[in-house]
Amino acid sequence: MTEALTDTAGVGALEPKIEKLILEALNLGQFPDIPERVLPYAQLVEAVQEPGRLPWGDVLVFTNEEAEALKKLNFYRELIDHVKPTSWVLAASDLSAAIVGSLSVLPRVIGTAAQRYSVCEVAAVADAVKRTRFALSEGIPRDASPP
């Protein structure tokens, strides 16, 4: 999603304040030494659905199932990424459902991000998306419960 949002200035997926500072510096011919902080995951998900945010394609529209899976995946990601020591128990089937549900979004994100490269031929992008869809459908079992 970060790649899909990134425009030619390289700032589309950054925090708005940082984006503004970088663009101001670039417009003055300077190369700013500003930490590039990418939007948090939940905001990236929202941004790819906002009209006008994707510089190289249409907004991404998620089904209710995909949106729920993305929310769950973010919840699990935050559990793992949390700075405080915590412990929790998670059923493998719950995590699997969130991952599998989220993966259906991936080919559309790849297709949108690939449009950014003008040297890319439409057929090459379509082939990459097709190969990604195949790999996702064949590589992850729908019922990934532990044996």
Image (cartoon, rainbow, N blue to C red):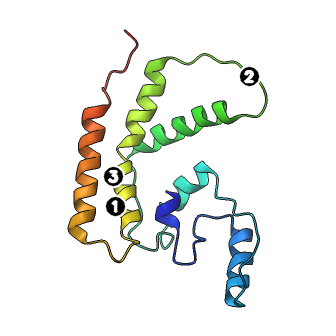
Q: What residue type is labelled 2?
A: Thr
Residue 143 found in image quarter: top left
How far apart are the two marked residues, 2 and 3, measured between alpha carbons?
A: 34 Å
Question: Image point 54% across, 61% down: which residue?
Answer: 47
Q: Nearer the viewer, residue 121 or 79?
A: 121
Q: How many labels does the image show?
A: 3
Left/right of residue 111 with respect to residue 68 in the rendered view: left
- To which residue does mark 3 refer? 107
Quadrant (top left, top right, bottom left, bottom right) of the C terminus: top left
How far apart are the two marked residues, 1 and 2, measured between alpha carbons?
A: 37 Å
Q: What residue type is labelled 1?
A: Gly
Q: Residue 111 carries which label?
A: 1
The image shows residue 113, relative to residue 132, as above or below, that is: below
Q: Residue 86 carries which label?
A: 2
How far apart are the two marked residues, 1 and 3, measured between alpha carbons?
A: 6 Å
First reached walking from the N terminus: tag 1 or tag 2: 2
Element marked by disc 3: helix
| Coordinates of residue 14 in the picture (x, y in percent) | 64, 64
Q: Residues within 10 Å of mark 3 (few under 14, many from 20)?
A: some
Residue farthest top in this picture: 147
Q: What residue type is labelled 3?
A: Pro
Q: Nearer the viewer, residue 25 or 17?
A: 25
